[in-house]
Image: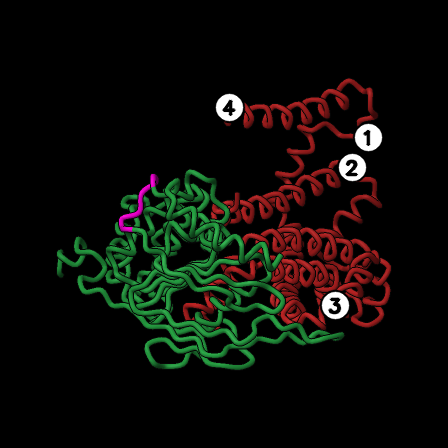
Chain colours: A green, B red
Amino acid sequence: MQPLANITPLKSLPRAGAIEVRSVGQVFKTSTQDVVALSDVSLEVKPGRFVVIVGPSGCGKSTLLMMMAGLRQQTSGTVTINGAPILKPDPDRVGVVFQEASLFPWLTAEENVEFPLALRGVAKSERRAKAQDALRLVGLDGFGKRHPHELSGGMKQRVSIARGLVQDPPVLLMDEPFAALDEQTRMTMGDELLRIWAATGKTVVFVTHSLTEAVYLADEVVVMSPRPGRIVDHLQVPLARPRTYEMLSGDAFGRLRDRIWRHIKKSA
Amino acid sequence: MALGIKLARAAIVVAIFALWEALSRSGIVNPRLLPAASDTLAMLGQLLQRASVRNDLAVTASEVLTAFALAVPFGALVGFLIAENRCFAEVVKPLLFFAFSIPKSIFLPMFILVFGVGFAQKVGFGFFSTIFIVIMSTTTAVEQVKVEYLTVARSYGATSAQTALRVYLPSMLPVLLEALRISMIFNLTGVILAEMYASRDGIGHQIASWGENFQMKQLLAGVVMIATIAIAFNEAVRWVETRCSHWRT
């Protein structure tokens, strides 16, 4: 028994992943025509970076994320994480946080967090200890026994994040995780996520259609446009960390958001 | 509040029996057609002492349970296979609705011709009465498993067996239990109907013959007996159901 294991954070040493997307294309064949969902997408994400992909509906941003997660196969090109291609889901390398309602309602919060470990046959006591750590990390200490329907929307997404982190993967992929939350909760969750990211040092790729959220969270913003889905801009966000609410009304913030908005307006 | 509701329910049941008693005792309804509730319940006690009646109950129970034990796994398997294959589901589902809409009782004479009068005829007809509702319920249960849940399982590397056991089963369980409960209603109806129509034993056969012989007390006692058994089973499954589906809001 190691009582310390229960109070230390997930991992003392940050372990981050490098993602490389090279000339990825995706074509959907329908009965009448071929739809190009992604066209020649290349992107490099350095270890420990917080990268946000933003773009209007149908630009293929979620598709790209699902390819990084190994949940979808591209028609052409390669996706590699830490040097090895992603051909199928690999929970050792990637944790995924989905949109709302991806928790299993029949399991408690801690059982949901334990789910990835249970699949690998990790012993019950170890599972419980790791889930406790992950729940503490996301600020849900003491809520482990609740079922999802007893948690607020923000708390549910915290559980999702804990589930994504419980195996300590170097990369965390997030598919519009806060889209269903109200504005205040969304802001709070953004700050929470940045705190968790700073504490764990993971590489995060975050998909959203909110420009403000994109600039507020990111080290780098990747802008995509639809028909066919492609990257039209890749900008650095030089704002200091930690990010504060006051930055939202600053000039630097406004200029970045305007630059993204112009791309999106052009493609609409 | 909860206690008040329970008391109100109990009061309604008591009132029905009281009304029944009063109608019969006062002669508003001819007591030969409607024996008093107290007499009927006394008769029920007597009937339960009789070896022949107990034997009839055992025969019916064995028929019902056999039909149920055959129809539920078989129907669940067929339902699962149908729902798993989207194309096949498209083709077959309307046909199942056709089959389901036909009153099963019109096939009863055929069951007698094929199986004769006996155990196989009751079990066969009970099975036939139950199978369609089991298939359709399972299909629905599979279809209401959210794609999101399956994607989550896949993203964490779940095998097919793990997905079946840890995602499909718990997600389907509340619907399956409900299906089980409703299937039993169909099953019981099927078996008892088969017994009433043509049989040498079984409680359904007894009820039919009490009716033909104008033994109203016995007939009503039989009705109360079957009703109690059916309600008890239904409530037992419902109890399990609420325990397993507390997470459904």
Residue where numbered disc 3 is placed: B90
Residues at badges 1 and 4 in contact (C-beta under 8 Å)? no
Q: Mark 3 against mark 1, which lies toward the viewer?
A: 3
Q: Quadrant of the N terminus of chain A?
A: bottom left
Q: Is residue A177 left or right of residue A1?
A: right
In the rendered image, residues at marks 1 and 4 fall on the same chain: yes
Q: In terms of sequence position, does the residue under pointer 3 or pointer 4 come before the other?
A: 4
Q: CA distance from mark 4 to mark 2?
A: 40 Å
Residue under label 2, please give it: B216
Does dot 1 land on a helix, a strand or a loop?
Answer: loop
Identify which residue, A146 or B175, lies in the foreground. Answer: A146
Name the quarter where the C terminus of chain A is drawn: bottom right
Say which chain tag 1 marks. Answer: B
In the picture, the disc for residue B1 is: 4
Residue type at mark 4?
Met
Q: Residue at x 33, y 72 (%)?
A: A18
CA separation in Å, label 3 and label 1: 56 Å
